[in-house]
Image (cartoon, rainbow, N blue to C red):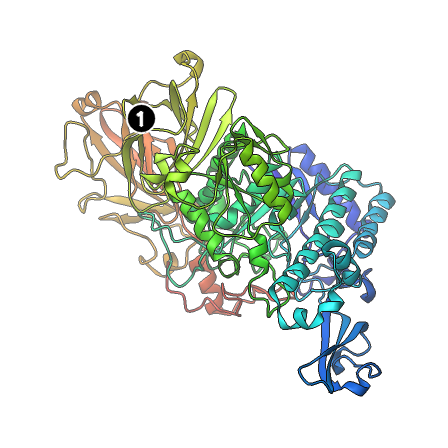
Amino acid sequence: GIGAVEITPLYGVKGNEQNNIPFLSEHWMQMLRVCMDEGAKVGIQVDMNCGTGWPFGGPEVPLSEAACRLVVTDTIVDAAVADTIRLLPPLRERGVAELTVQRSFPTEQSDRRRVIALFCSRTRQKVKRAAPGGEGWVIDHFDSTAVAHYLQRFDRAFAAGNTPWPHTFFNDSYEVYGADWTPRLLEEFARRRGYRLEDHLPEFIDGAPEVVAHYRETLSDLLLNNFTRQWASWAHSHGVQVRNQAHGSPANLIDQYAAVDIPEIEGFGLTDFGIKGLRTDPGRTRPNYSDLSMLKYASSAAHITGKPLTSSETFTWLTEHFRTSLSQMKPDLDLMFCAGVNRMYFHGTCYSPKDDAWPGWRFYASMDMSPNNTIWRDAPYFTAYVARCQQLLQWGQPDNDFLVYLPVHDMWRRDTRHRLMQFDIHSMSRRAPDFISAILTIDSLGFDCDYVSDHYLLSTTTEGQLLRTAAGTRYKGLVIPGDCLLPPEVQAHIEKLEAAGAKIIREVEAEALAQAAVPEALKARCGLNIIRRRNPTGYHYFIANLTPEDVDCEVPLAVALKQARWFDPLTDTWRQAVLTGKGVRVALRSGQSLFLQTFDNAVAEGTQQVSSEPLLVFHRTPTASTTEDHTILDLSASDKEWTLSFDAESVPSISKTYQLPALRSWEGLDDQTAVAMGTGIYATTFRLTSRQLKAHSRWLIDLGDVRESARVFVNDSCVGCAWSVPYVLEIPSGCLHRGDNRLRVEVTNLPANRIAELDRQGVPWRKFEEINVVDINYRPTSYAQWTPV
């Protein structure tokens, strides 16, 4: 079910040096061609990091074009020598730092002067996790010449080998540490801000908000024009798209994301939604720094500029290694979908030779979606879910209610004692707490929004009472969160839009929002996460219940409709929606997600190709075993005998068949099962009467708590795979018959118990040349102390 791969070369493995292929060498380019040819055979798109590791840099980057840092010497001297003294940079910077400017300024004492010297030095950061042939200095992203020279290396490599260019070039999150200067910054500052920074050095050094904000805005402009746009233009000249993670950069994120073909956001950690029945693994996860407000930066840029795709680096540090399940992946992915993501990338899969002993080659920051992970067995069910969701989320156009002005000028005026401000996902709660609060409030009131920057707001026009971006995306109003700073030209344009009939909302308040748009009760009343899109026949919603509570209610929608149908992306089934005088009947269990498609006009049932049977409505477990609605057969009862065996791929090999007097987990059976990874096959029989079969046309099996996924077979027919909460599957009526019925549940666990045993045995499986597998806090670790999962 994989449709694309991104190749990011990394450092090598100990003892494998003879097999290293230097990046962009003739041999490397031959291997890239092989990858592209193989991908074409099976319909897999091949993307490529425009470098190795991260950030961009390498052996051809001279120190003179490497990332820069500002070094300041600031002192008080006798006024008589203030204009003749020559300050030096700190000792550690000498030989690297070059004087940019030195000025003297008056002090409160007439015989004393303050002398400030600015030196342009180099951070001397090298490419992080570089592959062989990719080692070297990180480039100066603010210097157009440095960026151009860096890209020429790719021109030469592709031309020499006559290798086809990849579909997309990729740039990882901006992790350029301490780069806060570039040789032409003073010149660019004067041209863009209208005054000279060197005339205001005391204010700049002392953290005057306006001066520091102008400096930060200048860095933003330089990164946008000299790196992002130049990189995109270069790639386009070769027929290649660009995919960029702008977060982490010292720039207006909307402009950075909007400058590329595919904006990409990142999830980092596991969100504690409190979903009923979802394993949390306390102490072995880290909180997700990417909440809804962070995830929307990339999709906002895509929506306002009419770009069809928003991608995601997904499942980075979701949990501790070897402990990530498919069920844990789904809720954070559903949140991304609701935030506008419609193309996800696994983070990630480390290449590992087929003949390498398990667990093979393991990268330190990824959750390993590969055949070396037991969850790979049932991953096709997960990827099918993803593909179905993405197909619908890439269809149509976005239909968010409001544009929200991104108050970046207020952000740039915060914390000015530290010159460099980078908008990384870990620090956004400090950078923009008021903005985050506004976005989450808008969401809680039942509305959806996209962020807009100065640049894209200035090209927004009116269409009746609607706002229309230059790309044609329409919104019902503009929200200006709080008393934020607006450049004069932006303020004037907002007044012009308002005079033309646009709704301008200056406070995030329910009544003001409701005067411009209809709130979605699915959000405001039910607490569901949703995203709505327009399509040629109406609208379609993705709806996720990321709450601890089941939802069963009738709610009105914010859009007019004549008919509606539900789509379950887990099972690939459509069912007609039940419409009442109160709205649409909505029934989602905690953790469940569905699509709802509405139609502007009534559609004949045959053209919908859906069953008229209502969507499954869950029932709370009744106290009696039989009700008018359904019959419950308790297959986990203490007197129900089961057998347990293991499939041939499980490790260690277990040939024994266990007779279980009651259903139980396997890790406590004996020493072998305590360390087993793979698939255990539970089997039993159950009896049905003719009366029961005639009374019920629909049968469900609720597996309860599954560790971690389970394929279910009834009378040797596969009825599905339960890999996410709630672990409930529908059994087609044709699978059941009168008398004894065979039930087989093939349960696949995580590799945690097996890897813990390897550490107890001292097996040296950590073998990369750098960092190796560390824990979620980036510390060296052993799993020997883990108790069986």
- Mark 1: few/some/many CA within 10 Å (<14, 14-19, 20+): some
Is 281 or 518 nearer to us in this picture? 518
Q: Using the rendered view, name the quadrant where residue 571 is placed.
A: top left
Q: Position of residue 741 (x, y in %)?
A: 26, 31
Is 342 or 766 nearer to us in this picture? 342
Residue drawn at 48 percent across, 64 percent down = 758
Q: Is residue 210 left or right of residue 335?
A: right
Q: Position of residue 386 (x, y in %)?
A: 50, 37
Residue drawn at 59 percent across, 42 percent down = 301
Residue drawn at 68 percent across, 85 percent down = 109
Residue 529 in view of the camera: no
Picture quarter with the N terminus = top right
Q: Position of residue 753 (x, y in %)?
A: 42, 59
Looking at the image, residue 403 lies above or below residue 209? above
The amino acid marked with disc number 1 is Gly
Is 421 or 751 nearer to us in this picture? 421
The furthest residue to the front? 110
Label 1 SS: strand
